Amino acid sequence: MSHSFRNTTSAVVFLFTILFTLPTHAQRKSKEDQPLWAKTSLSAFKFRNIGPATTSGRIADLAVDSKNPGTMYLALASSGVWKTTNNGTTFEPIFDSEGSYSTGCIAIDPNNSNVIWVGTGENNNQRSVAYGDGLYVSRDAGKSWTKSGLESSEHIGMIAIDPTDGNHIYVAAYGPLWSSGGERGIYESQNGGQTWTRILFVDEHTGFNEIHIDPRDSQTLYATAHQRRRHVYTHLSGGPNSAMYKSTDGGAHWNKVSNGFPSGDVGRIGMDISPANPDVLYATVEGHGTFSSTDRGESWNKRSGHETSGNYYVEFVCHPTDVNTVYSMDTYAHVSTDGGKSFKNIPKRFKHVDNHCLWIDPSNTDHMYIGTDGGLYETWDGMSSWNWKANVPTIQFYRVAVDNDWPFYNIYGGTQDNNSLGGPSQTINQRGIINSDWFVTNGGDGFESATDPDDGNIVYAQAQYGWLVRFNKQTGEKTPIQPQPRYKEAPYRWNWDAPLVASKHQKKTLYFAANKVFKSTDRGDSWTTISGDLSRQLDRNTLPIMDRYWGPEAIALHKSTSIYGNIVTLRESPLDAGHLWVGTDDGLVWKSKDDGNSWSSIKTITGLPKTQVGSLNLPLVYVQDLMPSQHDKKVIYAAFNNHKNGDFKPYLFKSIDGGKSWDDIAKDLPERGSVYSIAEDHINPNLLFAGTEFGVFFTLDGGENWAALKSGLPTIAVRDIAIQERENDLVLGTFGRGFYVLDNYSPLRELEYVLEQESAFFTTKPGLLFRRASIGGTAYKGAQLYKAKNPEVGTTFEWYLAEGANRVKENRSEANEELPHYPSLDQLQKEDWEEQPYLIFEVSDSLGNPVARFTKADSKGISRYTWDGRMSSKASIRTNGEPITEAYGTTFVLPGTYYMSLSRSTNGTLETLVARHEFKVNHLYNYEGIDMEFNQSVDALMARSNEVSARYSELNAALNKLRAGLRNTPGASLEDLSTTRTIEMELKELGVLLNGNSTRKKREFETAGSLGDVTGLLAWGTFNHRGAPTGTMRTMKEDAEAMITDAITALEKIADELDQLETKAREQGVPFWD
């Protein structure tokens, strides 16, 4: 029976209703109503991505350009879109500024490979899936993107483009995972995505995960519907409305596939059309097995019981040329070579598990790409061996922690499916932070880590469900320390991401939580239970899913979900030992003032949505984060996350009376984007940071106003925040782009004050001077070697200028309105001759002696620049485009107090903007016997050497002109022409002294060092060597001085001879021009 589903809806019988009473957030402020600091550009404060790329995050889909197979696009589950144009040697992110970071599918228009379609929102259903905002299209191969509709779909399953018409597109809209409604179904566009028509719809709980076009007949379509839902307490991966549909008229009418195909409760369906014979279809059906059809889906046969999880996989890929071979994506990928009767594991040696997408080269079927939770792999031998692409830094961090190591602190975090890791915030290596700098602290899915406050060698790291170890960095030993229930004790309920605290007050003390709170006073060797079950202890089987109750036979019921009713956040007050705060996954907040001896429930937080469950109306909102203030014992912040009920609003509250009452401080945050983490500045109690689904925000007034910090940060979820207090660094753990560091955010504390000035420096963090090492072994490892940037070495200045220089063009007088508005030629000439305004920075020591000067382009607003701490050289100047010049640095200045002045040059007129700004400089190491006088004398020697070389070049040029004139002027003295040869030989002799003996060099004879050799080596030595000069350096300096003396004597003699000859030549009428 054929049915038309175009523009239809379904009647729904509501067996049970979950009512969300949503609070009304205060109206977001307009830009005009915000304080100045909240609307000022902060682009100078740029985040630094440090990776790592030790593994990559989950690749949801990939697309290879059929016309140019070296070009490939990756759609990552939580990292945007990445592109390679060189067969995967290097990748670049091309989706960083769009409205979503999560992508689920990607397609290249077979008619025009510059047209790329992306569906946002991961097309899986697992616990950490992120949502999107519809479709995007690029018409210039990913250089720019345009949003193309279906914004409320939240998850796009698949995109299919008509091979005969690139403007004709079909989309399988999966629809919301955590709620009903939204744009779900099969959608069609016939005008390149300008408009969309829903041509197949089932109900508000059922979306479509796949859409396929028969390669021989674009009117024949296959679509798979999936009824599914996830909440904090459950996951259900099927129902009676999951099915496969077929259309033979381009989607005008659809038939539900039956005749041997499973019915009743069905899970997710993955299918593919065999390119070798498009009459043959394969389908993997969750809850039922593997099926095939040999008549284009008219009838089906069960081939085997092989199936995979609809939470994470359920995808078949047919072999391009062998109709009996089909690949199945799964934890361990499988292949069948007998038409689905049997499957075997694909070799995974040296390869990650959790496979999601596969591309098979149609011209060489042994060549394939496969996308996994660990990144992209390539094989050239039919999956016998794998090459991992090691430079896609898209790792997914749940948590971040920092230690206090010196000179560079370390950063730790737990990742989705890629271990708990640790690594440096920067390195001594001038090439940056490389993958080998990182180490694994625990395996599995990684989560919260904690560093021991008293032993920097100890890190507490966990994997899923509370698998906690004490990791020894020195030995690599991992001691298991997870609390265990005693014999006959009720088992504990651990969250996927269990909370952990290393006490700052009590040595060797840890707090850890399942559904109960545990305390250890011996670094985890033993534990004491210090609370009862702090959850609501609800039976999740009594909670409705998709408006009804389900029995235990329901498809994948509760699979890949933490057992409901556990503690998800745990904090100890920074000011009060044993003052604990706890939050649960079912919406409860508790506190204990006596180290767990007694607990009180906090029931005064109003404004949270509530869920009607039977006769109860409860705020079952996940307590995402609790943060007791480090400035006031009575201040506590609480973040709640309701996105797993389809509610994406931020919920952030503050109490100033120990939890008796609460104020909503999320009112100025974007309305779309849950809050994941909160951090409080250790100096200014009103400076807070909030990590959200779409970036990080800060406030200077305790949450009344918020502004985004986004320079250097792509659109990404910020799951956790850590502050490294010694360095004043803000460290972000992002879910898809690794770690980001904002080096020295302390200027934010002064932002309000500085913005009131006309011109001012922010307080400058003491500079730390050292030289990064040229560590071998990385320079020749190819472009695929991943290197994250170190911060610049030196003293970093931040300054603010309310206005830029007044430009000549701005002073044009307005003409009479009745006359043409054309400036005078005098005015235009002034504009043409105008000098670019610039800023002059001069550094002086504590005695007022100038040590360095550099210039920068004029600027308005906040700027940032790092001076490398080197004294300006008198030997040479480099030009970065006039009038921006900078002296080459020589040796580092000594530790101490210095002063900076700032002036502006406007067409030669100097204006002092800041007369004197104090700052300090330190050295990383205490070098003994630094001889500044010697170092400066070497710089002076270099200057003299450069002068000698310049004079030598001038004399050579003068000799060449004179000789050319004598040769070509009739009547000129031939005797004088002969004399020029004598002078030429004198210059050549001098050239040996200055530049070395080329006759010996090119014939591989030992050669004495020239003045250039000796001074160059001396300069290199003082630049790189920090201690007292070596004896060899001192003797080389003496030799260089003697060589310069000899060179000057020779130059003066040659100059006199040339002057005499030139005078005679002019008397003979010899011309002098080029």
Image (cartoon, grey):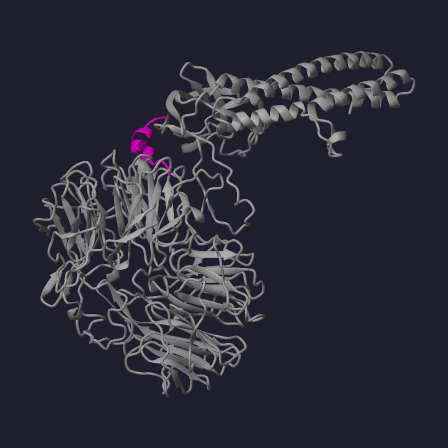
- 758 within the magenta span: yes
Against 683, residue 115 (above or below) is below
Residue sitting at 33 percent across and 61 percent down? 129
Front residue of 385 and 655:
385
Residue 295 in picture, x, y percent from top left = 46, 86
Residue 762 in picture, x, y percent from top left = 35, 28
Residue 512 in picture, x, y percent from top left = 20, 51
Against 296, residue 332 (above or below) is above
Q: Is residue 845 left or right of residue 499?
A: right
The quarter in which the C terminus is drawn is top right
Q: Is residue 601 left or right of residue 812?
A: left
**In this picture, which residue range is highlighted in magenta?**
743-759
Residue 547 sits in quarter: bottom left
Residue 319 in picture, x, y percent from top left = 50, 75
Front residue of 310 and 927:
927
Front residue of 393 and 837:
393
Q: Is residue 728 visible?
A: yes
Against 653, residue 191 (above or below) is below
The quarter in which the N terminus is drawn is bottom left
Q: Is residue 973 visible?
A: no
Front residue of 1042 and 743:
1042
Residue 427 sits in quarter: top left
Residue sitting at 21 percent across and 59 percent down? 494
Q: Is residue 372 left or right of residue 571?
A: right
Residue sitting at 53 percent across and 45 percent down? 777
Residue lying furthest right: 971
Q: Is residue 827 left or right of residue 711?
A: right
Number of numbered discs overlaid on the protein picture? 0
- 705 within the magenta span: no
